[in-house]
Amino acid sequence: MHISFIQALLCGIVYFLGFDGCPIVGVTISQAFKRPIVCGTLVGLILGDPVTGCIMGAAINLPYLVVISAGGSVPLDPGLAGTLGTALGMASNVSPSVAVTLATPFALLGTLLWVVHMTVDVAFVHLCDKAAAEGDLKKVCFYHFVPPTIFMFLITVIPVFVTLYYGGNAISGFISSLSGTPLTILSLIGGVLPALGIALNLRAMTSKDTLVFFMLGFLIVGYSNLPILGLSLFAVIISYIYTKFIVKDEVNED
C-alpha cells in the first residue's frame, strides 16, 4: 500500500491530537485519541480500511493497557506506537502481531518527543511570567497557547509525515525482505508483548474489590458464550450501579 502526501499528513495530525494535553481538544479527549485502538482506527479510516486499522490498533493497545505517568515518570508513548504501528503495518500488509513489534520502538521515540516538548515549553512559561509582570494579559494568553501549540504541531506531525511519506516504502520493502523465519520471529515477539500488557493490568487489579469483577467477567465469558459486546454492556451497568450506590455510600459514611 502506498501512503500519499495527504494521508501521511492526516496521520500526523491524528498523532498531534493524541499528544498529551493537546490544547486544541483538551486533556480528556487527547487521552482518548492517544489510545492505539482509537488512533489506529482513525489511521485505518485515512488509509481506506478502518476495520483493519481497528484490529491492528487493538493489538497494539494491549501492551499499553496500564500506561500511566506517576511520580514524574515518563511512560512509553502509545499514541505514536498506535499511529505509526498501524500505518506501517497496513502499508506492509503484515499481521497484527507483527504490527505490535513494529510499534514498540516508536513508543520510545514518542517519549523522547514528550521530553523535548516539556523542555522547550519552559521558555514559553518564562515569557508568560515576563508578560504577567508587565500586566499584559493578552501576551500571557498568547504565550500560553499559540507558541506551545505551534511547537507541538511541528514535533508531532513532521516526524509522522516524514516516516510515512518518505520512509513508508523503504520500511515496507524491508519487512517484505524478512519474509520467512525473521518475520515469524517478529510475529512471536508481537504475541508475547500483549501478554505482558495483560499481566500488568492484572497486577493493577490485585485489590479484592476489583479482582472479583474480573473473575466475574471471566466466568461469564467462559460459561455463557455471551459475545464481548453484550458483556461490555453488562459491565457498564454493573460499574454504574457499583459506583452510584456502593462507592457513593462509603464516601458519604466517611
Image: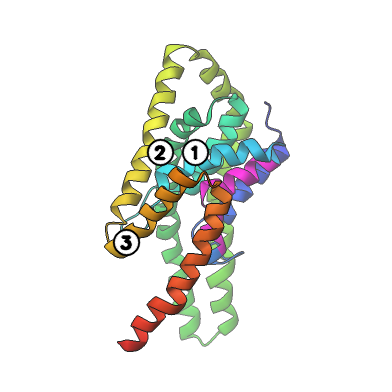
Q: Position of residue 189 (x, y in %)?
A: 38, 28
Q: Viewed as shown, does residue 248 lie left or right of 170? A: left
Q: Amino acid at mark 3?
A: Ala
Q: Viewed as shown, does residue 231 lie left or right of 91? A: left
Which of discs 3 and 1 lies nearer the camera? The answer is 1
Question: Disc 2 or 3, which lies upstream in sequence?
Answer: 3
Q: Which structural element holds mark 3?
A: loop
Q: Tell me the residue at 63%/42% (across/down).
A: 43
Tell me the distance, in whole angstroms, between the alpha carbons under discs 3 and 1: 25 Å
Asked whether 78 falls inside the magenta stretch, the response is: no
Quarter holding residue 149:
bottom right
Can you say whether 235 is above or below 100 in the image?
below
Residue with the mark numbered 1: 59
Tell me the distance, in whole angstroms, between the alpha carbons under discs 1 and 2: 7 Å
Q: Amino acid at mark 1?
A: Ala
Q: Which structural element holds mark 1?
A: helix
Which quadrant, please, contains the C terminus?
bottom left
Question: Disc 1 or 2, which lies upstream in sequence?
Answer: 1
| Residues at circles 1 and 2 in contact by the CB criterion of under 8 Å | yes
Q: Position of residue 15 (x, y in %)?
A: 57, 49
Q: Tell me the residue at 34%/59% (across/down).
A: 212
Q: Viewed as shown, does residue 210 lie left or right of 142? A: left
Residue with the mark numbered 3: 70
Which quadrant, please, contains the N terminus?
top right
Please tell me which residue lies in front, 67 or 234.
234
Q: Which mark is residue 194?
A: 2
Give the magenta range: 29-45
Asked whether 33 falls inside the magenta stretch, the response is: yes
